[in-house]
Amino acid sequence: MHKPRITAALIALAMSAISLGAATTAHADTPNTAETTDTITVNAPDSSLTITLDKPVSEQTATQIQAQLNAQPSAGTSFIHPDKIDPGPIHPVVTSSEANRVFTDRHGTFNVRYNGSTSLNWGYKVAAPLVAIAAGPMVERGIDWYVAYSFLGHGGRHVVPVYYNLHGTQGGLHSGNELSWNDVLTFPVEAGGVPGKAVLNIGGTFVVVK
């Protein structure tokens, strides 16, 4: 009886098939890579925060960082922009009889005092949860002021510690003016054990009355 000859070529072909099958099985058993992100955002009524990390972190870590920075202000806190009330937006009124009007959101506290003539004093302080992850000095772009959306003035650029109470004086206004302001604060952070950069946009609108 004639027996088939097993050649070296057939053996090599069989070994190649076994190797390919093993590689395919190993690939199928490999778990999917967890989703990651290098950007964390936390918005508030009067400000927006974007943290860009130097390398991605897991979605779980990003959510934990976001929760840490997302603490709500205490009940009854005044906001620069209140909820819209029909038939249109209603802005807070700051009177000269107030020693210091304070507005807060989850990112920081803005205070203002109208002097009853042509000027006001203002200040801004970054919230404690943000200060806790800061890893270096803060760069303030310089505050911009507008009267009824017409440009009024620009404050100077500053480089200060994140916990510093920014402050200044703005002139050229009158009782009854609707004032809007905005500023940008940038500083390094370490969040979830990863370095990065935070950009905080702040601003608001209010009316001054003598």
Image (cartoon, rainbow, N blue to C red):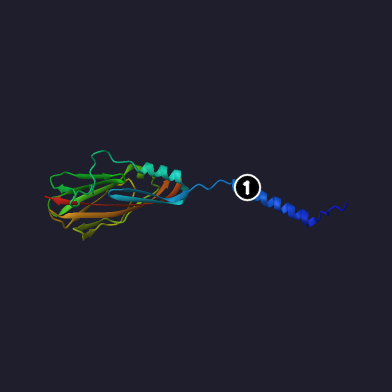
Camera-nearest residue between 68 and 123: 68
In the displayed structure, does residue 37 sit left or right of residue 50?
right
Residue 200 image position (x, y, % from top left):
33, 51
Residue lying at the far right in this picture: please name it.
Answer: 1
Camera-nearest residue between 125 and 83: 83
Residue at screen point 85% across, 52% down: 3
Residue lying at the far bottom in this picture: please name it.
Answer: 150
Residue at screen point 35% across, 45% down: 130
In the displayed structure, does residue 207 sit left or right of residue 105?
left
| Quadrant of res 71 | top left
Residue 138 image position (x, y, % from top left):
35, 51
| Quadrant of res 67 | top left
| Res 192 seen here | no
| Res 48 seen here | yes
Residue lying at the far top in this picture: please name it.
Answer: 75
Q: Which residue in the protein does label 1 denote?
A: 26
Residue 40 image position (x, y, % from top left):
40, 49
**Hey, what amino acid is under mark 1?**
Ala
| Quadrant of res 184 | bottom left
In the displayed structure, does residue 54 sit left or right of residue 81?
right
Q: Secondary structure at mark 1?
A: helix
Residue 146 image position (x, y, % from top left):
21, 58
Label 1 packing within 10 angstroms: few (<14), some (14-19), many (20+) = few
Residue lying at the far front in this picture: please name it.
Answer: 1
In the displayed structure, does residue 175 sit left or right of residue 192?
left
